[in-house]
Amino acid sequence: MIAEGTALLLVGSQGRRHVVRAAKGMLEVSGLGVIDGDALCAASFGDMIRIGGQEFTVLKPSVRDLLNLIERKAQVMMPKDSFLIPLHLDIGSGSKVIEGGVGSGALTIVLLRTVAPTGRVFSYEIRDDYAKLAKKNIAMADLSSCWDLKVADVCSTQLEKDVDAAVVDIPNPWDAVENVSASLRVGGHLCCYVPNVNQLDTTVRKMREIGFGEVVAFETLQREMIVHEGGIRPSFDMLGHTGYLAFARKMKH
């Protein structure tokens, strides 16, 4: 039995995927129409159910599933970048994290899944339309309880104090570095994400200027390996440049 309110992933035989929240009665699901919610609640993870003449497997959605299915308005950070950020920020359950720039909420979901259930993410977004969309996506991911969102400029507004880490994904992260630094605890980590080399140069210089240590910048490239009976080869398609990650650590008060 699946409890009402549980987020479910329905995977069709043709690979179509839908996220739905379990509830009794008739449910309207985008792309599927009206479905029987009682059948969902009576199922178990791994069961096959029939919807509109098609068979779907019921699964618990992963972070990657959620990122692939969220509604997008802004360009989202790819998993090859976002999944590395919690490791280099040294955050986990219970951590407090500031996020500057929310966009569609893809990175927010990764951060929230990392710090849940006892941590907190404090997000700042200057655009009201992005904030509204992010709220919708975070609610779909069932992570709102760990999240605070403010429509404000991370470069100038007063931020929470003594946080463990911060991530800035805005066009001008160097303008936020000093304000964010004041909110970090000693030993806390900062990450800035930028798509262009000139932005990376300005950001790294600002990190060093105000006294951050352990400053490092890199990009991540990802290429799938195709495995079949005839042999193994790299994919002809490669997920190459998307952006640069710059990390630094606060070394003193």
Image (cartoon, grey):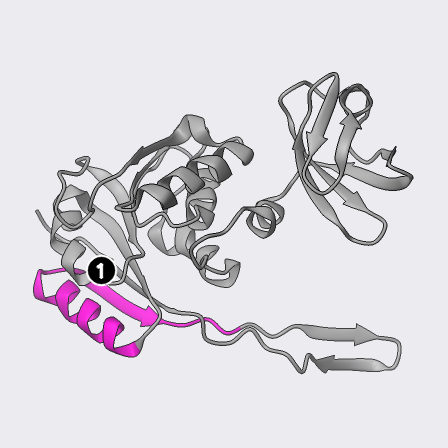
Give the quadrant of residue 9. top right
- Does the magenta segment cover residue 205? yes
At 31% from the left and 50% from the top, the residue drawn is 101
Q: Looking at this view, is 61 or 85 the one in front?
A: 61
Q: Find disc 1 in the rendering and name its residue.
A: 173
Give the quadrant of residue 172. bottom left
Give the quadrant of residue 129. top left
- Does the magenta segment cover residue 95? no
Chain part drawn in magenta: 197-221
Q: Position of residue 164 (x, y in %)?
A: 27, 42
Q: Position of residue 102 (x, y in %)?
A: 36, 47
Q: Is residue 80 left or right of residue 252?
A: right
Q: Is residue 56 left or right of residue 73?
A: right
The vertical placement of 204 against 41, above or below, is: below
At 55% from the left and 49% from the top, the residue drawn is 67
Q: Looking at this view, is 87 or 83 the one in front?
A: 83
Q: Is residue 238 left or right of residue 10?
A: left
The vertical placement of 174 against 161, above or below, is: below
